[in-house]
Image: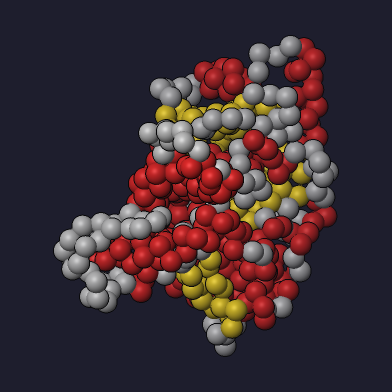
Amino acid sequence: MFVSRVALDDFRSWRQMVVDFEPGLNLLVGANGLGKTNIVEALEVLSTGGSHRASSSAPLVRSGAAKATVRANVTDDDAVTTYEVSIPVRGANRARINSGKSLYMRDVVGKVPTVTFSPEDQRLIAGDPATRRGFVNQSASQLLFGYYDVLQRFNQIGKQRAALLRQIQQQRAVGMQSAGSADSGFDQPAYDPMAAAMSGLEVWTGQFIDAGVELTRQRSRFIDLLNAPFARIYRDLAGERHHAELVYAPSFEEVPAYGEHVDDEGLDGEGGMESGGTVSGRGVSSADDRIRLAISRHFQRIYPGEVAQARNLIGPHRDDVIVRLNGMNARDYASNGEMWTLALAMRMALFEVIKAERGDDPILILDDVFAQLDESRRRQIVDFAGHQHQALITMAAETDMPQGLEAHRIDVADLVASQNADHIAGSNGAGRNIAGRNAAEGR
């Protein structure tokens, strides 16, 4: 599998752009600010459903445009498939395959697997938990069936639940201000907004728990897949005496702790939740029910704090992955060089796992990484890239290129000049160009 062509409309800095790639090494060379990183970022979005550079879709759309479009021709066993993703400023992303019917984003995520090495990779070790969650989300979306879907569902449920917590907080404030109105002699309205909000919270909490448990289990499975190759690759890079591991730290601690059972105390009595809860009924028996009941009780305990802060205090949105080096938290104890090597090992392990699990070689993306690394680590990445079916490499200056690296060279300044010329001439656009060129080449 390799990407033969990418076309962008209104993506980041690109108004319209078409670029061709070849199997093997492809080198995108251009000064900073020309948009070379935006090109490979577009492939990352097509592959994973998101970007490690943005927490939402809005920054991916060129200023003043309503939506961005990414198209890619992917060649696999001499068959060419065109994947298309539309990214609106507001609303859900949509996709198409070979100009077919409109699809959900989940229908194309992982179809074109990629692994990206970037200058920000050191933050996988030194950064905050959100950075590591982002890595897990993008990676697991390509590997595990249904991961992207449950992640999106969990995020939507979380927003609804947080909105209800804010509503309850506001209703409490209003109730305190009008506490004396009950003695005014006037009939109170039959509709009780607080009771309605509490009833809604119970429903959304149940859904939040269900989606959160599923997401926690998927993340645990992903870390299990990654751990062994990560440890082995780090030893290969740093030496046999070093041991690295990934430790999943879920916010829903009840999932691993009560995976098979919980204490029997109270499980056979009436369930029910006084506030913020969800599980009710008699005779809880399955492991899943026991986990959910334990989490529901946790929500009961923290309910006052959640209302006070108007946000979800526990759940997979607060997960972390701890990177350990020789038994210690690498975030606190690893040197700068060790952090880079750990991050490289994580990316290389991901590449290996995707290849093993899916049977496809991921597209390797090296985004301006050579300038950040010493000669030894440059050589390690070059050796790795040289053995892959396709690699896309961006760099600001060819002097950053390690000696002996042969690649198909693309001058990004030429792409910018072509874009500007097409705009002045009133070009029909990159979307038509890709279809027209496909026809001209018999694709």
Farthest residue toward the front?
Answer: 185
Q: Is residue 307 left or right of residue 404?
A: left
Q: Nearer the viewer, residue 257 or 120?
A: 257
Q: Is residue 207 above or below residue 316?
A: above
Q: Is residue 133 above or below residue 71?
A: below
Q: Is residue 403 left or right of residue 231?
A: right
Report if residue 173 is visible in the image: yes
Q: Nearer the viewer, residue 194 or 141?
A: 194
Q: Is residue 263 left or right of residue 300?
A: left
The quadrant where residue 267 appears: bottom left
Residue displayed at 79% across by 22% down: 420
Residue displayed at 50% across by 72% down: 246
Q: Is residue 61 above or below residue 283?
A: above
Residue displayed at 74% across by 65% down: 373
Q: Position of residue 232 (x, y in %)?
A: 50, 75
Task: Give the number of callouts.
Answer: 0
Q: Is residue 49 above or below residue 378?
A: above
Q: Position of residue 429 (x, y in %)?
A: 65, 18
Q: Nearer the viewer, residue 91 or 72?
A: 91
